[in-house]
Image (cartoon, rainbow, N blue to C red):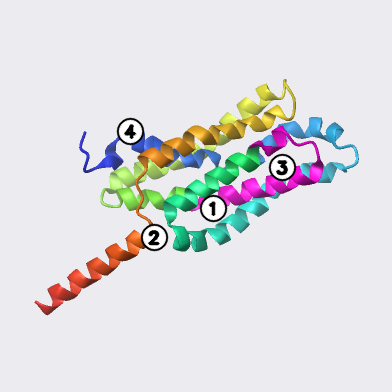
């Protein structure tokens, strides 16, 4: 393998694309709602259904916050932060029994996904912009991964619901292998390093102009 081109490695491609699995997974707990109606007798039907829809609001908030975190920490730490929030908030309803904390956790899972939502797409050209064929292929794979995540979540939830509605939220443990893969195999420069590289390149360009 050519170490100068890590983006050509299969493990790199899997690690980069795997974060897209969760982009469409937040509302996937809808099949659990009928069981949850009985778990929260004091909450009306619309309130329980909000557990499936409120992540969409969180995603919007996460998308708005993401650019500021990227400037502050860099792209990779922002994605890692989003994945950790998705893991913690996503699995929280497994142990919780009160409606309000679960509602908050559902909002937070949306915010976590929102932090890396746009980056799941924008990172691909950073690695493949020099090869249009590979870029198109990876963008296609990225779209497929989102649909695959939704289908996988639907399948797993149907099985987990035979245990309990709490168990349905175990699907978010899928974040753990994705988080490990992304940390280990996707090298991204920090925001500070990017600024240093840009400054160095600008200096080199000025020297060339002088010559």
Give the quadrant of residue 151. Answer: top right
126 is higher (above) or lower (below) than 208 = above
Read off the magenta span: 91-118
The residue closer to the viewer here, 210 or 176, is 176
First along the sequence among labels 3 and 1: 3
Residue 155 horizontal side relative to residue 68, left or right: right
Mark on residue 191? 2
In this rendering, the label closer to the viewer, 3 or 2: 2
Q: Is residue 94 magenta?
A: yes
Q: Residues within 10 Å of mark 3 (few under 14, many from 20)?
A: many
Q: Is residue 195 left or right of residue 60?
A: left
The C terminus lies in quadrant: bottom left
- Nearer to me, 91 or 118: 91
- Residue 10's mark? 4
Quadrant assignment, res 198: bottom left
Mark 3 vs 4: CB contact within 8 A:
no
Is 149 on the left-hand or right-hand side of 102?
left
Residue under numbered circle 3: 52
């Amino acid at each position: 393998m050519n170490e100068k081109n890590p983006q050509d490695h299969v493990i790199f491609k899997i690690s980069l694309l795997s974060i897209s699995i969760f982009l469409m997974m937040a509302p996937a707990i809808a099949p659990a709602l009928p069981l949850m109606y009985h778990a929260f007798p004091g909450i009306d039907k619309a309130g329980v259904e909000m557990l499936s829809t409120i992540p969409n609001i969180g995603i919007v908030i996460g998308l708005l916050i993401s650019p500021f975190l990227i400037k502050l920490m860099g792209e990779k730490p922002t994605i890692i932060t989003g994945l950790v929030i998705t893991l913690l908030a996503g699995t929280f309803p497994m142990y919780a029994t009160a409606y309000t904390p679960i509602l908050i956790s559902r909002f937070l899972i949306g915010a976590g996904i929102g932090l890396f939502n746009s980056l799941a797409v924008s990172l691909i050209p950073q690695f493949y912009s020099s090869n249009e064929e590979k870029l198109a292929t990876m963008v296609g794979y990225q779209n497929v991964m989102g649909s695959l995540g939704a289908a996988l979540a639907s399948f797993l939830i149907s099985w987990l619901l035979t245990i309990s509605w709490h168990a349905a939220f175990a699907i978010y443990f899928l974040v753990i292998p994705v988080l490990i893969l992304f940390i280990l195999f996707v090298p991204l420069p920090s925001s500070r390093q990017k600024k240093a590289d840009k400054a160095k390149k600008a200096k080199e360009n000025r020297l060339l102009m002088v010559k």
